[in-house]
Every structure is written in structure tokens, then in C-alpha cells.
Amino acid sequence: MFEGSGFQARYDVTAKTPTDVLAGKWYYGFECSACHTRFAVWDDPGAGAKPFTSKHPCVFRVACPHCKTDRLYRTDQVQQFRAGQTPPA
Ligand SMILES: [Zn+2]
């Protein structure tokens, strides 16, 4: 819940493509607000042991690798997940 006044850092980040994502590895990412597909953005070096943290709330601008929709996501929307656990649609 941080909107309105005040400085808020915004970062442009790039989603990993499906071919970059290795089954069994842990990632941080987002669920696309347009097509609801989860995609990875960062490697999770802690393999699920530690939640995503940031010193300050910020927003990330990232394009969904599936539907190409460019959206803004907040720090609290970051998802931590292990790849390869969902069957192909
Ligand atoms: Zn999408």
C-alpha cells in the first residue's frame, strides 16, 4: 500500500524467457496481470530459503514474456517459486 506522494524508485527489468528458466531452479518473478502467467525475472540464489527483500519499496516495470504486456509491479507482488512444477498447458 504505497501510492500517492513520495519518491518511489522504479526499475526496468527484463523477464527471463522460458528457455532461460531451468526446471528445478528457484526464481523470483511475477504473475502477469494481463494473462496470469507466472514468469521469472531473477535467479533465487537461496533456493527458496529466503524471501525476496528490498530495502525500500519500489516498482518494477517488466514485459511479460508470454503476452508481451508491459506492466508495473510492486515489491510485494514478487513471487518466489521453483520452476518446472507446473504441467504445460
Ligand atoms: Zn502476460
Image (spheres, grey):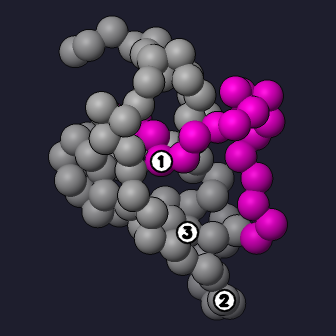
Q: Could you tell me the amino acid type at mark 1?
A: Val
Query: Residue 60 shows which numbered tag?
Result: none
Residue that label 2 marks = 7
Residue sitting at 44 percent across and 24 percent down? Answer: 22
Residue 22 visible in the shown view = yes
Magenta stretch: helix, strand or loop mostly: loop
The reply to whether the C-beta atoms of the residues labelled 1 and 3 are less than 8 Å apart is no
Residue 30's x, y, as percent?
47, 45
Give the residues drawn in magenta, as a range: 36-56
User: Which mark is first along the chain, 1 or 2?
Assistant: 2
User: Which mark is first along the chain, 3 or 1?
Assistant: 1
Horizontal side of residue 56 vs 75, given as left or right = right
Residue 38 against residue 6 in the figure, above or below: above
Residue sitting at 69 percent across and 37 percent down? Answer: 45
Q: Which structural element holds mark 1?
A: strand
Q: Could you tell me the amino acid type at mark 2?
A: Phe
Residue that label 3 marks = 59
Instruction: Report crowding for label 3: few under 14, some 14 to 19, many 20 or more residues within 10 A (C-alpha).
Output: some
